[in-house]
């Protein structure tokens, strides 16, 4: 009797265990399938996100156009028993011409950096600075119609190191690092046909002139003051084109009239750059630069730079 009872209990327990095992197994299989479905869904979402990020990166890369040119100009002259006379001299200039422009939908953002620095060494005179300039132009624009845009202009001009009037004896300090420095900004209208043809008109441009304490009262600042403020009309333009296949002409102009101080005395800053490409790494460079600013100098300022250049140019479009 006891054996029979034990056998029945064992059979019942076995049946219950088998049923519980089957139930647990079915639940496990179902959960595993659900988990696999969820993982597949997450994987698809991650792939979709990665794909979208890739598209955004490609679109952003296409939105930027970058062009830069770094040039080292070298001039050298030497004399030996030269009847006409002359001093041995070596001169070198580093020039940077860098553009980075952005375009997305109706928005455009054009940026240009012009920078140059030059030194010469002349026997019995030592080193002298021949060139020193830093300029950054930026125009943020929103399309209004066809080639016209609402715009906001920002322009900064200054220099890297001290400047001297070498005609004086002893030579006289006439400028210094960031002294003077000019910062102009204001809203306007922007005409843009391409990266190489653009004009900005800003009839309400604020202009700050900064000098160090050494030059307080100069460059348009009041006596004892190191900052001057102006409000006026600003026109800036940029035109670049090929004269021949290997000859490029670049024109950069800025015109400013201060409503608050002698508006009839118009400031003009005009620079023309000629680039004759000899091959990939070498060129002939000519720069003609004119500045008319009665607050900085009583007469017209002019500089001319010509030389054989070693170039490094890159494009990213």
Image (cartoon, rainbow, N blue to C red):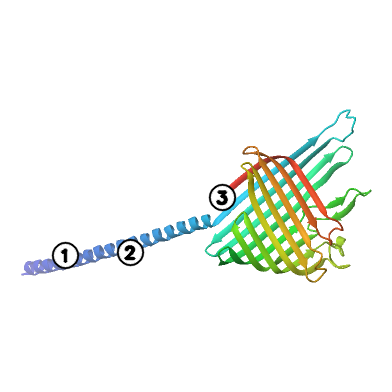
In the picture, the quarter occupied by the N terminus is bottom left
Horizontal relation, residue 235 to residue 191: left or right: right
Do the numbered discs 3 and 2 sit on residues whose CB atoms are within 8 Å?
no
Residue situated furthest left in the rendering: 1
Q: Secondary structure at mark 3?
A: strand
Residue at the image point whose x is 90% and y is 52% from the top: 172
Distance between the Cα atoms at labels 3 and 2? Answer: 42 Å
Do the numbered discs 2 and 1 sit on residues whose CB atoms are within 8 Å?
no
Decide which of tag 3 and tag 1 comes sooner along the chain.
1
Q: Single out the mark in the foreground, 2 or 1.
A: 2
Quarter residue 9 falls in: bottom left
Decide which of tag 3 and tag 2 comes sooner along the chain.
2
Q: Is residue 263 above or below residue 285?
A: below
Q: What label does residue 38 carry, if any? A: 2
Residue 90, image x and y in percent? Answer: 80, 38
Residue at the image point whose x is 34% and y is 63% from the top: 41
Distance between the Cα atoms at labels 3 and 1? Answer: 71 Å
Q: Secondary structure at mark 1?
A: helix
Depth check: give the residue in front, 24 or 78.
78
Q: Single out the mark in the foreground, 3 or 2.
A: 3
Residue 88, image x and y in percent? Answer: 84, 35
Decide which of tag 2 and tag 1 comes sooner along the chain.
1
């Amino acid at each position: 009797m006891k054996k029979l009872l034990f056998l029945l209990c064992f059979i019942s327990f076995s049946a219950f265990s088998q049923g519980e095992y089957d139930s647990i197994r079915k639940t496990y299989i179902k959960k595993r399938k659900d988990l696999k479905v969820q993982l597949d869904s997450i994987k698809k979402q991650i792939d979709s996100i990665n794909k979208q990020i890739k598209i955004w990166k490609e679109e952003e890369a296409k939105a930027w156009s970058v062009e830069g040119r770094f040039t080292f100009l070298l001039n050298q002259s030497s004399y030996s028993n030269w009847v006409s006379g002359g001093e041995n001299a070596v001169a070198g200039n580093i020039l940077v011409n860098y553009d980075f422009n952005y375009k997305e939908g109706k928005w455009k953002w054009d940026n240009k950096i012009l920078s140059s620095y030059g030194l010469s060494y002349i026997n019995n005179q030592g080193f002298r600075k021949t060139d020193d300039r830093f300029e950054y132009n930026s125009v943020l624009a929103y399309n209004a119609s066809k080639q016209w845009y609402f715009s906001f202009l920002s322009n900064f001009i200054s220099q890297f190191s001290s400047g001297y009037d070498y005609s004086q004896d002893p030579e006289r300090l006439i400028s210094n690092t960031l002294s003077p420095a000019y910062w102009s900004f204001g809203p306007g209208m922007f005409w843009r046909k391409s990266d190489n043809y653009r004009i900005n008109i800003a009839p309400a441009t604020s202009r700050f002139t900064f000098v160090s304490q050494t030059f307080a009262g100069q460059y348009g600042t009041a006596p004892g003051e190191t900052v001057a403020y102006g409000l006026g009309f600003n026109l800036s333009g940029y035109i670049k084109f090929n004269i021949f296949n290997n000859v490029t002409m670049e024109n950069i102009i800025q015109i400013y009239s201060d409503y608050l101080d002698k508006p009839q005395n118009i400031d003009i800053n005009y620079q023309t750059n000629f680039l004759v490409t000899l091959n990939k790494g070498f060129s002939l460079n000519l720069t003609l630069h004119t500045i008319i600013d009665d607050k900085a100098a009583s007469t017209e300022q002019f500089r001319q730079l010509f030389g054989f250049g070693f170039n490094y140019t890159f494009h990213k479009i």
